[in-house]
Amino acid sequence: MLCVVRNAVGELTAKLGFSEPDCRAVVRAVDEALTNIIRHAYLGEQEQPIEASFHRIDAPKDGQSGDALEIVLEDNGVTANPEKMCGRALEDVRPGGLGLHFIRECMDTVEFSRNNGRNQLRLVKFLHVQAPKKGA
Amino acid sequence: MLCVVRNAVGELTAKLGFSEPDCRAVVRAVDEALTNIIRHAYLGEQEQPIEASFHRIDAPKDGQSGDALEIVLEDNGVTANPEKMCGRALEDVRPGGLGLHFIRECMDTVEFSRNNGRNQLRLVKFLHVQAPKKGA
Amino acid sequence: MQIAARHLDKTTIFDISGDIDLATSPQLRKALLRELRELKMPRVVLNLGAVRYIDSSGVASLVEGLKASRDVGSRLILFGLNKTVREVLQLSKLVRIFEIYENEAQSVAP
Amino acid sequence: MQIAARHLDKTTIFDISGDIDLATSPQLRKALLRELRELKMPRVVLNLGAVRYIDSSGVASLVEGLKASRDVGSRLILFGLNKTVREVLQLSKLVRIFEIYENEAQSVAP
Ligand SMILES: Nc1ncnc2c1ncn2[C@@H]1O[C@H](COP(=O)(O)OP(=O)(O)O)[C@@H](O)[C@H]1O
Ligand SMILES: Nc1ncnc2c1ncn2[C@@H]1O[C@H](COP(=O)(O)OP(=O)(O)O)[C@@H](O)[C@H]1O
């Protein structure tokens, strides 16, 4: 099913006008975030409910407002331990601990929160619309 | 995870310009098709691989060519029995047996095939672009 | 999906919210069958106003509830059907088989 | 994901295709550890040309393979890295840690 999500998100981001590397970045972030929810919040159980919303938003960026894709993932799993949610130093070559790092590298905003017994992950990626060329 | 797929496909179809009922129809067809793959091809196992592709295509329609969304779902599960793949008469009020009927009602083309040990389901939905008004 | 139960005299009202799909419909089925077959509640009312999605397995659970209600001589009533829910019942040709009302007042009327 | 194995003198080549993710990376991990730790194959070459996606658990499996190869004194070689695979190794800051070649000929050179 992760594969289905990746392809749907890939097609959506392409349709929204993201560049190819940015499409891959958003797909990667969503995939890693879902993987983490299944592994850590639901302790490996695949059948638990995960909610997702995808919205085109106007978000503040560099003092201006920018066109962006906002993705919110929510689960009812175990409370995330904020101390562990930091990822790790990459210098230390060992398996694991890369997911959060990927998510942070791939998105412009990454916010974890917990409300009403639910974990929420909010991801934002700005659409870098090319500025219209003047004169040239 | 089905919820994530539904929301991603909902957003994708809206972005492609489908009407609201058509967006819901495509979401429903994909959801029911995935549910059937999990239940019937993978006998309830949720962790098995399902591939999906989403493409905007030009497909023949009423002797002309139409703008459409093509969705292809593939699985490595048990071979579907074509005799069972017909859905059932709705007059008979009983639980179950609605999924295929929903898929057929919701999409313009529904094709099952099996190649190289994989089941393939091809779904097509035409985008009904409004004809430009002449003169009026 | 979330199910919250309220109890009136001889009536159970289930306020259902979220998505009724492959993962959650067994829970709805169980709640309905318990209320009807085991507890023999004379009237079970489903408030579907906050249902965002219902798939064919959800519809199958409703049909099972309906059968159970007929078996035990109870009523199963639906209200608060939004566009999505209505569409699905129409697709299933089941709109005319269920007892459906506009709102809660009508659904719990004596 | 599919893994097909080919055997040359003192070298195993794995042709890997499809998606390496949460569901499939354990299979890759197992294949690598068997070849390196159990069979002590002196050189294991991964043809990643047909890999469409690799997630962090896939990268973790590659790192485990690399550690195993160092432990037993074997070589783990990657070739056929497409954009997606390259990006992920770059994100992981692992590009310089792996032995990576452009093509199979270089990877199996004596
Ligand atoms: N969705 C989540 N819920 C709870 N804990 C999480 C979640 N995502 C990450 N974590 C915690 O953060 C740690 C680092 O995550 P990550 O960088 O993805 O590496 P890994 O998953 O390989 O451990 C995890 O080991 C886990 O303790
Ligand atoms: N993806 C599939 N693979 C194998 N068999 C299938 C698949 N989809 C449907 N079927 C068969 O078609 C029948 C009717 O499917 P459906 O209309 O969805 O109703 P239900 O799933 O409730 O039985 C199923 O019972 C099953 O035998």
Image (spheres, coloured by chain):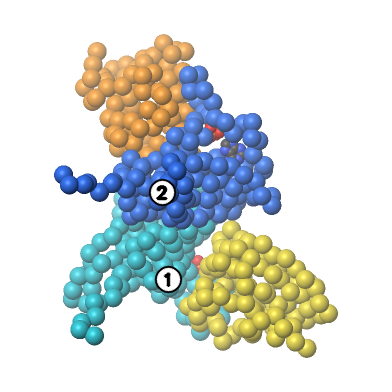
Chain colours: A blue, B cyan, C yellow, D orange
Q: Quadrant of residue C28?
A: bottom right
Q: Secondary structure at mark 1?
A: helix
Question: Please, which chain is the residue tagged with disc 1 on?
Answer: B
Does mark 1 have its CB less than 8 Å from ligand 2? no
Query: Residue D90: x and y, percent?
Result: 37, 28
Task: From the image, state whether disc 1 or disc 2 is nearer to you.
Answer: 2
Which residue is pictured at 38% across the width and 71% down the height? B19
- CA distance separating discs 1 and 2: 27 Å
The correct choice, above or below, for D22 with respect to B78 in the image is above
**Disc ID at residue B20:** 1
Which residue is pictured at 56% across the width and 45% down the height? A121
**Disc ID at residue A66:** 2
Query: Residue B84: x and y, percent?
Result: 43, 69
Does mark 2 have its CB less than 8 Å from ligand 1? no
Q: In the rendered view, does A118 fall on the left or right side of A98?
A: right
- Amino acid type, callout 1: Glu
